[in-house]
Amino acid sequence: MMAGSYSNLVVLSCTTAGQAAGDLLGSDESEIVHILWSVVDTTANTVSVPVQSLVVKPDHSELSDEAKSRTGMDEGAVAGGAPIQAVLEQLHQSLTNGVGAPFCLVVDGQQAMRQCLHPETCKKGISLPDYFYAFFDLRREFRKFQSTSPAISSVRDMAQHLGLDVTAVDECQAMCLVIERLIGLGHKFTDPETVDYKYEPGTYQKNELIDDDTILRVRGLPWQSSDQDIARFFRGLNITKGGVAVCLNPQGRRNGEALVRFASKEHRDLALLRHKHHIGQRYIEVYKATGEDFLKVAGGNANEATAFLRDSAAEVIVRMRGLPYTATAADILNFFGQSCPVAGGEKGILFVRYANGRSTGDAFVLFETEAYAQLALAKHKESLGKRYIELFRSTAAEVQQVWNRYQQCPLIHTTPTMIPMLPQQAITCGSIRDCVRMRGLPYQATHDDVLAFLGEYAVYVRDHGIHMVLNSSGKPSGDCFIQMYSPEAARQAAEKCHRQYMGDRYIEVFQCSGDEMNFVLMGGQLNKNGIVSPPTASGPAAAAAAAAVAAANQYQYPGYPPQVQVPQMSILPQGMMQSPRGIPSPAAATSPYYTSAAAAAAAAAAAAGYPPAMYPQYYFPSPPVSPTSVGYYPPPSPVLRMRGIPYNAGVPDVVNFFGGYQVPPEYVQMLVDVLGRPTGEAIITFLSHEFAQKALLEKNRQLLGSQPVELAPLELVPAL
């Protein structure tokens, strides 16, 4: 609309059912219950339509005292109103039939439009007419006219400054009086505010400059949330092109976080007021972040992935996972067929590869329209060759993250120089059967292969809950233990996946408990008939072995399982097992997982008649990840020990304390004593040496809550 071409201004004000009003209007996620509107004829400079009142019936009829005072209504009066969709249709009919075009809306401040009307109608699936996407903010227009005026926080402040008496009129009438006075003094209503119709994907370069005051970190998102879902959560606020970057964890799975870049600081500040608003039944946390944080997730280099995203006008990106390593672009085009054509043909397909060119089994595919994308996503878990393929809606930021991580280093690192000697807190125990044992895995099977095999049950796997079992030579044994979120999930996974094929091998899958899992690692046997206990060792030599084990455990962390254990229930006699599991042989002491005390325990155990084997933690390498094949160890990330944490603090508090240092929640281990009470200490794993060193220099003895905390490096031993 050209400047000065609006012949009518539609004045609008609304009230919600909650306590929040003024600059906080909409911050409590309350529904609209009352709308007032009027029309000012800018040519005649007079009110052409007097104030009209529309009562809106909310889904939840409770009214706050503030709402009752502002509207003069109680719950009964509001219950007699119409749903918001019917009210907006009535308003639309009145404006299109009774008001001369062109017209534009006017509101007092940004909140009524950006924090109330747009978010509520988006959540309820209501489409707004085009004129709701442009409006005048009366406060901003007043500041344009009176650039030297004092701070203005309401329409009554403006009226007072202009010498108008508005004590006996409602807010909508007061706005009309202010508009008339401004027009009479020569002010022109031009260049309205705009609300973006939809979010547009885009790309960023690593070296771009991003204003810190426009970035937010969002936490608690449903794992399947896309960039469009996040943009809908912030509907009414303008997000820059490509400004939603969904974060991935080190295993390449979404971690429930995202970084969002807004068009201005004002929009970022309004977004902060949506802290703990909801997506479905989940509340979403919103925090400030930095441009550096955003570029670490969304930024790319001048590489194949950036060109793939930049050169296409496609609307939707779909991620394919579980592709055969020999799959070609032609195979993918045939997989989707003519019903959902890939944008650009083979140019619309990006295979994700390691730096050495080896395939990862992932690919990204572009589709021109939402309709084609929906048809494509309907092929989720259909087969390509002998492999079923997982399909997910993806984002430009996810493409960059996955590509960069695989190109720079695998998502699970393979060549560590230092390995944190962390106790195995991740190992479960107890009689609850919330674990699954897989037997008969191909020796080359990886973490991702296990997730692909579990299919729909992969979402029930606990973070870092996949443990690949190694034999006494440090090579894959073909066994794997998986920790699930519930016994029911473990039962269903065992029933549905038992004797299904991974490649050309069928896999046996059994439900088990944490105790049974640890029992098997100590030399017992587990099958569908239960556990089988071998004979028990005893005698002076066994007692000596127990004493040596106690010496090896004297420096263990409070609340953690012992580093070394002699199985008291039973062990296998020498030679009964081809790859016996129990206490390590003295030769195993050269492993980076063992100390000199562990070697002494191994020697004593051998004298007691225990078979050569390995400690439980050799099967379960330290957090934050589990190995996927021989030679796979935890990432070479430095580790700090944190002391002095308030006892009521949790993982989110520690993550917030390290904001800007890239510490995911799963990299924080809160230490507890033997009774499960917090010790005030935590183990923090960082993604790089630089972040750890920076945190040590800048955050040591800083306050967490009201207490200063101490940071110190955790002792590391070199990997051999």
Image: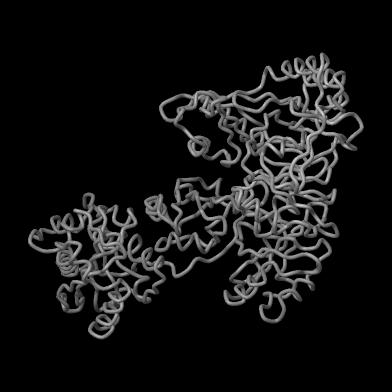
Residue 450 drawn at (x, y percent): 74, 52
Position of 342 with respect to 169 (left or right) is right
Q: Tell me: residue 559, above or below residue 102.
A: above
| Occupied quadrant, residue 664 | top right
Closer to us: 406 or 500: 500
Q: Farthest residue toward the right?
A: 575
Q: Quadrant of the C terminus?
A: top right
Position of 14 with respect to 301 (left or right) is left
Position of 593 with respect to 99 (left or right) is right
| Occupied quadrant, residue 591 | top right
Residue 190 drawn at (x, y percent): 31, 70
| Occupied quadrant, residue 155 | bottom left
Is residue 29 among what the camera can see? yes
Q: How many marks?
A: 0
Q: Which residue occupies 35% across, 62% down?
A: 114
Q: Which residue occupies 72% across, 75% down?
A: 345
